[in-house]
Image: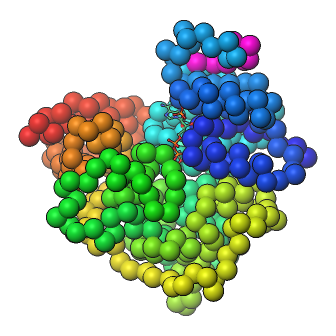
Amino acid sequence: MSKNIVLFGATGSIGTSVLNVFEKTNSEFCLKGITCDQNITSLIDISNRYSCDKLGVAREGLLHDGNEFLTTKNTVYGIKNFDSFINDDIDIYILAISGLSCASLALKIAETGKILAIANKECIISLGKILLNKCEKFNTSIFPLDSEHNAIYQLISNNNKSVRDITLTASGGPFLHLDLDKFESITREQAIKHPKWKMGNKISVDSSNMMNKSLEIIEAKNLFHFQPGQIDAIIHPQSIVHGILNYHDNSSYAFLSQPNMEIPISSLFFPNKDFRANEFDLDLTRVSRFDFFEIDNDRFPSFKLGKYVMQKDGIAPHLFNYTNDKLVKLFLDGAIKYTKIVYFNERIIELYFKSHQNINEPNVDDLNEASKWVDQNLKTIING
Ligand code: NDP
Ligand code: MG
């Protein structure tokens, strides 16, 4: 039966991969809504290609630009109005918007009782139990699209024995072998050029300094209800193994595939794994070697901080995630140096817990309060 889908963030890297999966199948998918932030040209193109008549543009300022095509369609402006895409006919909501701006939207989707297919890790980390409990209460299924989490999800679905712990892998990013004394002068262009994936700028910077993996261990803790001691990550530069379940008898199940996001995305539409795409053929004889090694805390201090934050839990993951969002923006705008992204985040966490108790199960107001505190204090920290 045909599935009705809303694709939030259709114009991004994940959005494009979702559309690529549609292109390669004869199955029935009906795109009922697509959104972008400001990339209207691409949104219009998608609308034409998939006969999708409901459009969303987050930048409200663009409303006044009076684009003729958009006025002939059912177009909403402003992310706060994206919940008008929610209705009973929709089967799957794909959340592929980057950053925390879609947190309220994620909570609204959680109330639908349908499928929330989520690539956006920022919401899972900051909202944590608020999102998960809401999904549970309304019987909404969360389907992880982040590749490592999708791997663990698929493994657990097939082998739900008594898992001892899990291992995520990290490619190591572009600076795995760079001299440490060159880190200070890493540029925006170097940081957004990932060796394995073509992704949005924010996640590319996160991948380059291992912040992405620090966020992902917390994402995994929230999604799969593991204790911090049951989650680790290792570097695997070939990016063929994505996630591993480890059992008490010291055996493990690993999930292998070519490093392409279309594979985890296809598992959303093809739970029986009959998605056929020859270009993703995994010929192990052509993967000349498999390397695995520990994450070096001197090279990637974000990982140590991420583990601390995961252990601390409560409001800490949101502080860490929110502050990182801000700092990555500042780096991309040329306002701070590369190495300061993690350094200032560490200072924020240190300063916050000097003057505040942790909050065990923060609610949305607590998250907003903490964000406000970061906004007020980050400037002081940056200006020394
Ligand atoms: P991109 O930057 O490529 O795309 C982001 C999408 O969200 C675009 O459609 C963009 O619109 C839209 N968008 C950006 N800001 C806003 C906003 N404030 N309000 C509404 N819409 C907005 O990001 P990615 O596709 O790389 O990543 C999306 C999410 O998926 C992130 O949370 C990332 O961490 C996660 N993810 C990505 C992976 C990847 O391989 N790319 C892998 C695993 C997870 P516009 O085009 O107009 O800017
Ligand atoms: Mg990932």
* Left or right: 52, with 172 as reference point: right
* Left or right: 370, with 269 as reference point: left
Answer whether residue 96 is visible to the viewer in this image. Answer: yes
Query: Which x, y percent locates residue 217?
Result: 43, 62
Q: Is residue 343 magenta?
A: no
What range is drawn magenta here?
71-77
Closer to us: 234 or 128: 234
Closer to us: 372 or 259: 259
Residue found at the very far right of the displayed protein: 1
Vertical comparison of 43 with 325: above or below: above
Query: Which x, y percent locates residue 358?
Result: 28, 47
Residue found at the very far left of the displayed protein: 384
- Residue visible at 36% across and 41% down in the picture: 325
- Residue visible at 21% across and 42% down in the picture: 336
The quarter of the displayed image where residue 288 is located:
bottom right
The quarter of the displayed image where residue 8 is located:
top right
Closer to us: 62 or 78: 62
* Left or right: 246, with 355 as reference point: right
Answer whether residue 228 is visible to the viewer in this image. Answer: no
Q: How many marks?
A: 0
Query: Which x, y percent locates residue 67?
Result: 63, 14
Quarter that holds the C terminus? top left
- Residue visible at 26% across and 54% down in the picture: 186
The quarter of the displayed image where residue 145 is located:
bottom right
- Residue visible at 45% across and 38% down in the picture: 100
Vertical comparison of 307 with 190: above or below: below
Vertical comparison of 94 with 211: above or below: above
Closer to us: 42 or 330: 42
Query: Which x, y percent locates residue 176?
Result: 34, 69
Q: What sort of colour scheme is used for the picture?
A: rainbow
